Amino acid sequence: MGYEGKFWFGNPSQPMQVIFDTGSAWAWLFSEECKVGNCPSKNERYFQSKSSEFKENAKAGQALAYGKGKIMGHPATDRACFTPENDHCLHNFGFLTVVQSADLSALRGSGLVGLAPTPSKGEEHTDPLNNGVPGFIAQLK
């Protein structure tokens, strides 16, 4: 059982169907850079090149495991909104742009937004591209 819904990423906003994961604090999306064979072909990609607020550290990487499933991505920031009207948004929202995955063919959606609370470190908020991506709940100020 899982929770699914829409979250709007980027500027202009792109609606992404995501899993809201109560057991994780991470947020990630399949990137437009994820080639067929490295990510499930049926899952929609996030086109970060279309967003005016997108920033990424392509030299840094983060790997995560979900049971048998795995992802590898780059720390990034962009605007993320709770509504399509863009009236409830987080600017500089930290997440991973996934460029490689394994054993996620059963996953529905474009990515994951983790709802588990985690304490954030100050460096995560001041420079998430170089100091790690803070959890979603920690980013709600």
Image: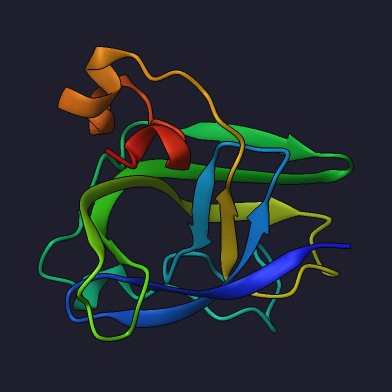
Label count reads 0
- Residue 65 vs residue 16, the one in the foreground: 16
Which residue is depicted at the point 51% across and 65% down?
A: 34
Q: Give the image location of residue 49, x and y in percent.
A: 23, 72
Which residue is depicted at the point 26% across and 80% down?
A: 13
- The image shows residue 130, relative to residue 61, as above or below, that is above
- Indicate the quadrant where residue 64 lies: top right
Position of the N terminus, as image quadrant, is bottom right
Position of the C terminus, as image quadrant, is top left
- The image shows residue 128, relative to residue 36, as above or below, that is above
Q: Give the image location of residue 92, x and y in percent.
A: 20, 48
- Indicate the quadrant where residue 50 lies: bottom left
Which residue is depicted at the point 87% across and 40% down?
A: 67
Q: Is residue 140 left or right of residue 89?
A: right
- Residue 108 vs residue 47, the one in the foreground: 108
Its colouring scheme is rainbow
- Viewer can see residue 42: yes
Q: Is residue 2 left or right of residue 52?
A: right
Which residue is most to the left? 52
Which residue is depicted at the point 64% across and 78% down?
A: 43
Q: Is residue 12 left or right of residue 39?
A: left
Q: Give the image location of residue 103, x and y in percent.
A: 84, 56
- Residue 133 vs residue 71, the one in the foreground: 133
- Viewer can see residue 36: no
Q: Is residue 8 left or right of residue 111?
A: left
Q: Give the image location of residue 30, x and y in percent.
A: 53, 64
